[in-house]
Image (spheres, helix red, strand yellow):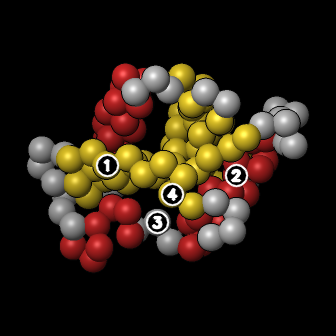
Amino acid sequence: MSQEIGFAAEAHTRRYLHQQGLQWITSNYRCRFGEIDLIMRDEEYLVFIEVRARSGNAFGGAAASVTYSKKQKIIKTASFYLAANKLQDKQAVRFDLVSLEGMPAKLTWIKNAFGLDF
């Protein structure tokens, strides 16, 4: 996905999730383990969100493009974020996936898309 499309998808997702009651914390968090597109708060949960945009659903679509390896990177990056902010063992977390497919884009929000036991 081109960088412009990625930024637009993340901005659209952020607005949508804000309308659903989530509070934005940061975007494009990076560390040596990887990147997390959005980090938001949903009541007691700190939510790490992967945003995927595709023009169509070939090869399983946007949601299917999140591989085992990508999930591992997201979890390691989230663990690093929690440790860096002294939140480990103090914060309930959730890993969500937002896919945007087609033109115009249809947004699908999958709460708790994967966890530590995937």
Q: Nearer the viewer, residue 118 or 32?
A: 118
Q: CA distance from mark 1 to mark 3?
A: 14 Å
Q: Is residue 54 visible?
A: yes
Is 99 placed above or below 93 here? below
Give the class, few, some or many, for how many residues have Cα within 10 Å of label 2's Cα (few <14, many ≥20).
many
Q: Is residue 7 visible?
A: no
Residue sitting at x 61%, y 27%: 43
Q: Which residue lies under the disc numbered 3?
A: 66
Q: Quadrant of the N terminus?
A: bottom left
For residue 113, the mark is: 4
- Mark 2 residue element: helix
Which amino acid type is shown beneath numbered disc 3?
Answer: Val
Q: CA distance from mark 4 to mark 2?
A: 16 Å
Q: Which residue lies under the disc numbered 1?
A: 108
- Mark 1 residue element: strand
**Badges 1 and 3: C-beta atoms under 8 Å apart?**
no
For residue 77, the mark is: 2
Give the class, few, some or many, for how many residues have Cα within 10 Å of label 3's Cα (few <14, many ≥20).
some
In the displayed orientation, state which residue is furthest to the bottom: 59
- Mark 3 residue element: loop
Q: CA distance from mark 1 to mark 4?
A: 11 Å
Q: Can you tell which quarter of the image residue 28 is in?
A: top right
Residue sitting at x 18%, y 63%: 56
Which circle's residue, 4 or 2, is located before the other in the chain? 2
Residue sitting at x 34%, y 30%: 16
Q: Position of residue 26 (x, y in %)?
A: 58, 29
Is 57 placed above or below 92 here? below
User: Is 103 displayed left or right of 7 in the figure?
Assistant: left
**Badges 4 and 2: C-beta atoms under 8 Å apart?**
no
Q: CA distance from mark 2 to mark 3?
A: 15 Å
Which circle's residue, 2 or 1, is located before the other in the chain? 2
Which circle's residue, 1 or 3, is located before the other in the chain? 3
